[in-house]
Amino acid sequence: MKMKKIIWEKAVTRELSLSTTWYPNTARIDNFKSFFGWSQKNLFTYHSGGLAVTYIDQKDNQKLLKHISRVYSKSPNLIKLLNDFEKIIKIRDQLAREIINKNFFEIDKKILALKFKAFHLNNYKCWSYHLICFYLLDAIDKKSLTFEKVKKQYERIRKIHPYQEYEEKLLPYINKYVARKQGVDYKLLFYLMPPELLSYLQAKTIINIDELKNRKKAYLLIAVDGKNKLYSGQTARKKFNQLNIERQELSAQIKGMIAQPGTVTAKARVVTRKSDFSDFKKGEVLIAHMTTPEYVPLMKKASAVVTDEGGIGCHAAIISRELKKPCIIGTKNATDLIKNGDLIKVDATTGTVEVVKK
């Protein structure tokens, strides 16, 4: 894999399937330019051991933020963008409900193919708007008159229309339908890319089960200079190692952006997977890569929240403000430097976290 020197920056770590990660990755590369006049050229997601980790080109990302700030810094553009986003996401949710509300033992494959195609095309657009709006809050002037208005509207949209609806409801529904037809474990079908699933439903292709088993071991979905490619299994591991990702020097200081002010000293609990949820105890500080709607019960029990990732419009920031729990986001190193049981001081007035006692 010949490529120019790229400074890869870790952006997102999630327990997400290939069927879901395909959308944001492909939208950044293929859809941003047609919608917003700019597209990212270099990024990849590597999945191994249950977690999908997305890396972006640092310089590429900085250019994107400048472009968004320049194009959408004026009120009419901002409000139109958010209104368009809400219209598209409402259509996507309605299309998903139309599929889920059918009994999959009775639904005709051709009808399912038509409905999923409509959903797929709409969800692709939806992800483009979602990502641009997310970046928008970090790119525009926080002191501008429209910032608070834009932030509130974006937070409202995200709370009403969580993207996990696809992962948690629609995708299992369709995969169980296909698994019943194919006689395979439906969980294996989460390693299909959406166009592959659509192609199968349209009776254009068959499902390569051996390839899906390879992807379950490891996959690398990578774009360099705007060209997407997927590798699986041992080949994915080899290609990933060839990228020579330099592990960033971890600062001894844990510092991030203040999402909700406050100060708390309590024991920490690092939660990076759903399997960690049952260990969480009331009053602990929640330490995570990022939170999603599944984390809300934990956030309600937590004394404070600290994340590696996130911006003004991220889930952790929105929910922490709603719960009035001290929250620091975007530390980049909290899950690396903090261990379960550490006594930590979360100072969400300065944006710092101190390990008081290990």
Image: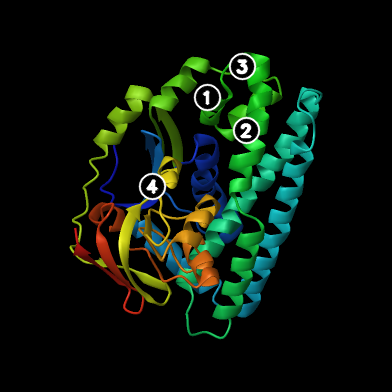
| The C terminus lies in quadrant | bottom left
Q: Locate residue 306 relative to residue 143 in the image: left or right.
A: left
CA gap, disc 4 to disc 2? 22 Å
At a point 37% along the width and 60% down the height, the residue shown is 284
Q: Secondary structure at mark 3?
A: loop
What's the residue at 63%, 15% (across, down)? 182
Q: Marks 3 and 1, Cα distance to the nearest angstrom?
A: 15 Å
> Mark 2, residues whose alpha carbon is within 10 Å: few (<14), some, or many (≥20)?
some
For the residues labelled 1 and 2, the Cα–Cα distance comes to 11 Å
Mark 3, residue position: 206
Q: Are marks 4 and 3 in contact (CB under 8 Å)?
A: no
- Residue occupying image coordinates x 75% and y 43%: 97
142 versus 286 height, above or below: below
Kind of residue at disc 2: Pro
Which of the two labelled residues, at mark 4 and mark 3, occupies the earlier sequence position?
3
Q: Residue furthest front?
A: 282
Q: Amino acid at mark 1?
A: Leu
Q: CA distance from mark 4 to mark 3?
A: 35 Å
Name the residue beneath numbered marker 4: 272
Q: Earlier in the sequence, mark 4 or mark 1?
A: 1
Report the number of discs: 4
Q: Which mark is residue 188?
A: 1
